[in-house]
Image (spheres, rainbow, N blue to C red):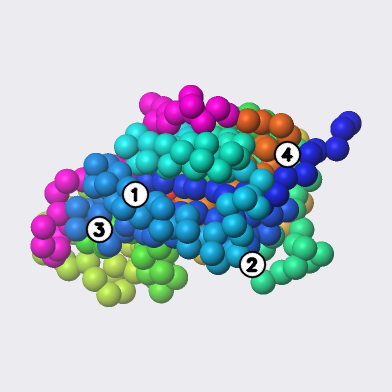
């Protein structure tokens, strides 16, 4: 097999949803990175408003690129290429990143590659872990399984290379992160509710509520969260209807029960599907991979089933530029190139996140 071509540091650009993120990565090491988050802007609407997201990306994209380059102490002429999230995502948001990257690639005479957002989440496991040097940082051998679990995706892949992801299964309805966000919103938690549900769940005790646990025996990577979400909604409405205030320990226990139901399904279906496909390494990536309950349950189940678990470091679970640069570096090394005159954004049919135009409770419009 021929050796992959060496490339200089790669600039990665991510604008598919509500983070404008850029990073410079070389041989899996993050040399510099910058993120301009829009979460406070969208919070008052209870979800991401696509048009507002695109307009804010326009304002922040160039300063974010400049900040990443200057933190890396890398000049444009020292770069080996540019990688940009080209799909899937909010079309206006993606367009800002893709057209900025196209213009920079043309102006700086650099190769460009458009990457898939979910594949970038998965490939972020190849980044050198923060605080570790190259010798200490270990990465999984191909082929491996990867659970990409975020606000827009809950999908299980077999990964044979940076451009070779085969879908083993996916959610039949909501993504896990979407379920966290929607249930959290019903409970009055601010967007995005996943981290807050996680924090409260750690203070609560699960087991008092009998929530449905469908799909547990599935070996085809099929997940489903909408029934669970409806069950939680009906439960919340019934208790509120009876005059109960869902706060303090009661709220924490509810979060613990909901999180336990999501985690149990993710763990059981993933490990059964892995067994069926005879895969022994499991990567878990994406925003929800930061969930403490999920990480603990996967660690325990993988130990029991003798599966090697490769959780992406929490610092790289949410949307970031380093994951895009890391996958871009691997693709450029393997000879992948796009044309900056034709590379375009592709939203695909998948909705990444619910957008609610109704202000969240307690927040002024
Ligand atoms: O990967 P990501 O940043 O963006 C998408 O590609 O969607 O994931 C964001 C999602 C949101 O739904 C957020 O609530 C969820 O990840 N999330 C979490 C946690 N941290 C982020 N969900 C559960 N527990 C967490 N600790
Ligand atoms: Zn993401």
Residue 60 % position (x, y): 36, 55
Q: Earlier in the sequence, mark 1 or mark 4?
A: 1
252 vs 354, nearest the viewer:
354
Q: Nearer the viewer, mark 3 or mark 1?
A: 1
- The residue positioned 66% from the left and 31% from the top of the image is 336
Quarter containing ligand 1?
bottom left
Q: Is there CB contact under 8 Å for labels 3 and 1? A: no
Q: Nearer the viewer, mark 2 or mark 1?
A: 1
Crowd rating for badge 2 (residues with CA inside 10 Å; few <14, some 14–19, many 20+): few
357 up-or-down from 204: above or below: above
Residue 233 % position (x, y): 25, 49
250 up-or-down from 151: above or below: below
- The residue positioned 47% from the left and 58% from the top of the image is 66
- The residue positioned 24% from the left and 71% from the top of the image is 247
Q: Nearer the viewer, mark 4 or mark 2?
A: 4
Q: Earlier in the sequence, mark 2 or mark 1?
A: 1
Q: Is there CB contact under 8 Å for labels 2 and 1? A: no
Q: Which residue is mark 1?
A: 57
Q: Earlier in the sequence, mark 3 or mark 2?
A: 3
Residue 295 % position (x, y): 57, 60
- The residue positioned 71% from the left and 32% from the top of the image is 335
Q: Where residue 130 is drawn, which disc sits there?
A: 2
């Amino acid at each position: 097999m021929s050796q992959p071509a060496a490339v200089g540091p790669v600039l990665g650009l991510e604008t598919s949803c509500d983070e404008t993120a850029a990073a410079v990565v070389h041989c899996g090491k993050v040399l510099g990175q910058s993120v301009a988050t829009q979460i406070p802007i969208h919070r008052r609407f209870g979800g991401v408003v696509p048009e507002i997201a695109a307009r804010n990306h326009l304002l922040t994209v160039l300063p974010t690129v400049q900040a990443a380059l200057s933190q890396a102490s890398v000049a444009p002429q020292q770069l080996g290429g540019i990688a940009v999230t080209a799909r899937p995502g909010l079309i206006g948001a993606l367009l800002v990143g893709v057209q900025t990257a196209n213009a920079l690639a043309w102006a700086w005479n650099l190769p460009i590659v458009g990457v898939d957002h979910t594949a970038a989440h998965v490939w972020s496991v190849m980044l050198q872990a923060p605080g570790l040097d190259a010798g200490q940082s270990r990465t999984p051998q191909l082929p491996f399984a990867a659970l990409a679990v975020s606000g827009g995706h809950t999908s299980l892949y077999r990964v044979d290379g940076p451009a070779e992801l085969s879908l083993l299964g996916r959610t039949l309805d909501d993504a896990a992160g979407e379920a966290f966000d929607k249930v959290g919103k019903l409970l009055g938690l601010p967007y995005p509710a996943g981290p807050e549900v996680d924090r409260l769940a750690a203070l609560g005790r699960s087991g008092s509520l009998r929530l449905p646990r469908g799909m547990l025996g599935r070996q085809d990577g099929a997940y489903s969260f909408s029934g669970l979400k409806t069950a939680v909604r009906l439960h919340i409405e019934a208790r509120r209807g009876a005059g109960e205030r869902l706060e303090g320990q009661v709220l924490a226990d509810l979060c613990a029960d909901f999180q336990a139901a999501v985690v149990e399904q993710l763990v059981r279906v993933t490990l059964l599907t892995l067994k069926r496909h005879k895969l022994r390494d499991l990567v878990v990536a994406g925003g929800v991979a930061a969930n403490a309950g999920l990480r603990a349950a996967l660690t325990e189940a993988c130990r029991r089933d003798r599966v090697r678990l490769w959780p992406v470091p929490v610092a790289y679970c949410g949307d970031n530029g380093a994951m895009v640069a890391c996958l871009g570096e691997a693709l450029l090394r393997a000879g992948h190139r796009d044309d900056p005159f034709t590379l375009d954004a592709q939203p695909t049919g998948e909705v990444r996140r619910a957008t609610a135009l109704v202000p969240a409770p307690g927040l002024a419009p």
